[in-house]
Image: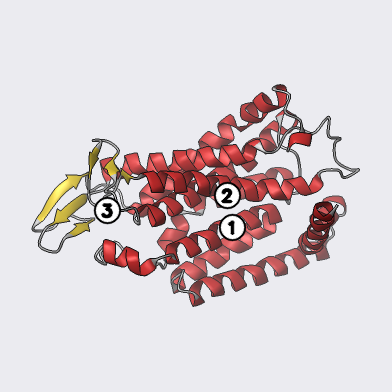
Amino acid sequence: PRRRWGLSLYDRALSALRLDGKMAMGGQEHLLWLRLLFSIALSIGIAYHGYYSRSLTRSGAALGGVVGVVIFFCGTAFGTILIAFFLSSSRITKYKYKSKVKRLHQTNIRGGSRNWSHVLASSVTAVLVVLFYHSTYGIHTKFFMGKAQRYRTSLMSAYIGHFACCTGDTWASELGVLEQAMPVLITKCRRVPQGTNGAMSMTGTAASILGGAFIGAVYYFMSAQDAGKESGPSDAEMPPQWPIILLGACAGFMGSLIDSVLGSLFQYSGWVASRQVIVQRPEKGAKHISGMDILTNNQVNFLSAFVTSVACGWIAPAFFEYFDEAGVTSSAV
C-alpha cells in the first residue's frame, strides 16, 4: 500500500507538470504555450546548473538549452531520460576527478566540461528521433511497448537506446580509468596504457552495462505508473515492460563496444615516453599504439550512438514480442 500511494503521488505531480493528457484530449493552444514556457524555463535551469557546476562550457550550456527545449516540449518522458543522462554522467565525471587527473597525467582530462561539440554529438540523433516522433504522434503520452504499438515502440526504443549508449559510454570511460589493471585494446587483445582509444576494462564494461540499464530503468519506472489505471489495459493484456531495462543494458554494452572498435581503428593513440602520457594526435616523439588519425572523439561518439539507436529501434518490436509470447505478464513487472 505504501508503494502504491507513493507511485500515485509521483504520478499526480508529474501529470500536473507535463499536461500530456490534457493536450492529448483537448490540444488547446494556451496549453501548448504553457508547455513551451515550461520547457524553456526547465531547460534554462538545467543548462545554468551544468554551466555553474562546470559540467558544461558556455557553448555547451547554450546548445544544451536549445536541445532541452525541443526534447521537453515533445514529451516529458523524453526530457526525463535526458535529465537522467546528464545528471548521472556529470556526477560520474566528477567522481574521483583528482585520481583521474593523476592517472592520466592531465593529458586526457578536459576539466570535466563538455562544449557544444560534445553536446551535439550526444544529442543530434535523439533530437531527430523526437522530432520524427512528434511529427507522427504529437506530444508523447504514455503507452505500453509491444507488438500492438510496433512503430511507436521502435521510435521510443531508438531514443532510449541512444541515451543508453551515451550513458554507458560515459560511465565506462570515467570509471574504467580508475581500474588498477591496464585495459585491453579490443582489436589486438593486448594490454595498453590507460587512456588509449579503443581499450576496454572489466570495470568499464560493467559500468557501460549498468549505465544503459539505468536509462532503461528510468523509462520503466515512468511507464509503470500506468499499471492498474482504469484507462489502461488489464494485467492480463498489458505486455511486460521490464524488457526495456534489458534492452537498455544491451544498448549500453553495444554502444561501448562500437565506440571501442571505432576508436581503436580510426582514432590515433600514441605514447610519449618522455612525458609518460597518451596523445590523441601524431607528434614528435610519440610512439604509435593504435588507430589512424581519421575520426575525432566526438565523431566516434556520434557514430556509436547513431548505430546503437538504429539497432534498438530495429529489434525492439521483436524483442518485446518475444517476452510477451514467452508468457511473462505485467504482473511480474
Q: Is residue 110 visible?
A: no
Q: Which residue position is annotated with label 3?
A: 194
Mark 2 crowdedness (10 Å alpha carbons): few <14, some 14-19, many ≥20: many
Horizontal relation, residue 205 to residue 325: left or right: left
Label 3 vs 1, first from the N-terminus = 1
Viewer-closest of 130 and 270? 270
Q: Residues within 10 Å of mark 3 (few under 14, many from 20)?
A: many
Front-lying residue, 260 or 102: 102
Provide the secondary structure element on which disc 2 rests: helix
Lateral position of residue 167 relative to residue 82, left or right: left
Residue that badge 2 annotates: 214
The circle on residue 84 is: 1
Given the image, on which type of amino acid does mark 1 rest?
Ala
Q: Is residue 180 left or right of residue 301?
A: left
- As measured in the structure, the alpha-carbon distance from the residue carrying label 2 to the one carrying label 1 is 8 Å
- The residue positioned 83% from the left and 34% from the top of the image is 235
